[in-house]
Image: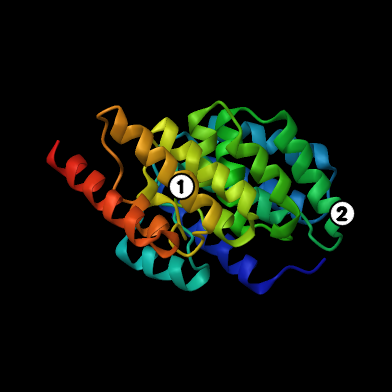
Amino acid sequence: MTMNSNRINVIKLLNKWLSRQVDTKALTWLEEKRQQIAQGSSAKVFFLAFSAVPRHTGKEDLKLTLDDWQTIEVMRSGWCPYNWSIDQAARTLLALSVPEDNAQEYVQTLEKVFTAADVSELVALYQALPLLPYPEQYRLRAAEGIRSNMTAVFNAVALCNPYPAEYFDDIAWNQMVLKALFIGSPLNLIQGLEKRSNPQLSQMLIDYAKERWAANRSVPSEIWAVIKPYGNASIIAELERMLAYSDSQ
């Protein structure tokens, strides 16, 4: 069973992080399960281990050093585990250990976990999308994540995650940005916001800004960079007044 060399390096890095914060007993359990999964044991072993992770590792915040962050950017551009927990890192490690030789089998295995996952498991899976094999296969699953009524799940897809900018079509992308505005998720944490600007999103944000301004409500300054490439002179002048008003509040 082959494994992408970069994925092996990510697994080693996750192991390194976990070894600093998890006791020997938990590490032994995790490595035993990882080996079983990597050697092609039944999917049930993966499902049960994935669910059981927090009982062994705990749920503390993952503590990363400056050196860790430098390694992260080299390993996977845009990967941003700054708000990860220990159990999230361990679950990602297990997901990366599932044999990837057969794309259909790998994706089906992950889909079964997505379908039965609780909130914390969904957060781990969605944040791991840019690291998983066959990332293009999860477009519909990720689009479903941004329709979730659970803010934590939506944010796992939308914020600090390079996956949407790389794989969403404009419809899903625009839906995500608008929902982030409406539920108050910070736009500055959406990767690729300016790069993925498009005429349809620009018009949607113009309408949003006008509605907010008419109701004497502030307008987030981040939308300016998305609107500007597609706005005419009068629209830009009007938006500048809106943003100036928002800044004065």
Depth order, front residue of 28/171: 171
Percent position (x, y) of residue 4? 70, 70
Q: Residue at the spot x=34%, y=61% of the render?
A: 233
The disc label shown at residue 123, or none: none
Q: Quadrant of the C terminus?
A: top left
Mark 2 or mark 1, whichever is nearer to me: 1
* 3D distance between C-alphas at marks 2 and 1: 28 Å
| Residue 90 visible in the displayed image | no
- Label 2: state its secondary structure: helix
Percent position (x, y) of residue 202? 47, 53
Percent position (x, y) of residue 156? 51, 42
The residue at the far left in this view is 248
The disc label shown at residue 104, or none: 2
Q: Amino acid at mark 1?
A: Leu
- Does residue 2 appear to the left or right of 173 in the view shown? right
Mark found first going from the N terminus, 2 or 1: 2
Q: Amino acid at mark 2?
A: Gln
Q: Residue at the spot x=79%, y=57% of the render?
A: 99
Q: Quadrant of the N terminus?
A: bottom right
| Residue 21 visible in the displayed image | yes
**Image-quadrant location for residue 66:** bottom left
**Image-quadrant location for residue 215:** top left
Q: Residue at the spot x=83%, y=59% of the render?
A: 103
Depth order, front residue of 31/73: 73
- Does residue 31 appear to the left or right of 116 in the view shown? left
> Badge 2: how crowded within 10 Å, few (<14), some, or many (20+)?
few
The disc label shown at residue 159, or none: 1
> Badge 1: how crowded within 10 Å, few (<14), some, or many (20+)?
many
Percent position (x, y) of residue 56? 55, 34
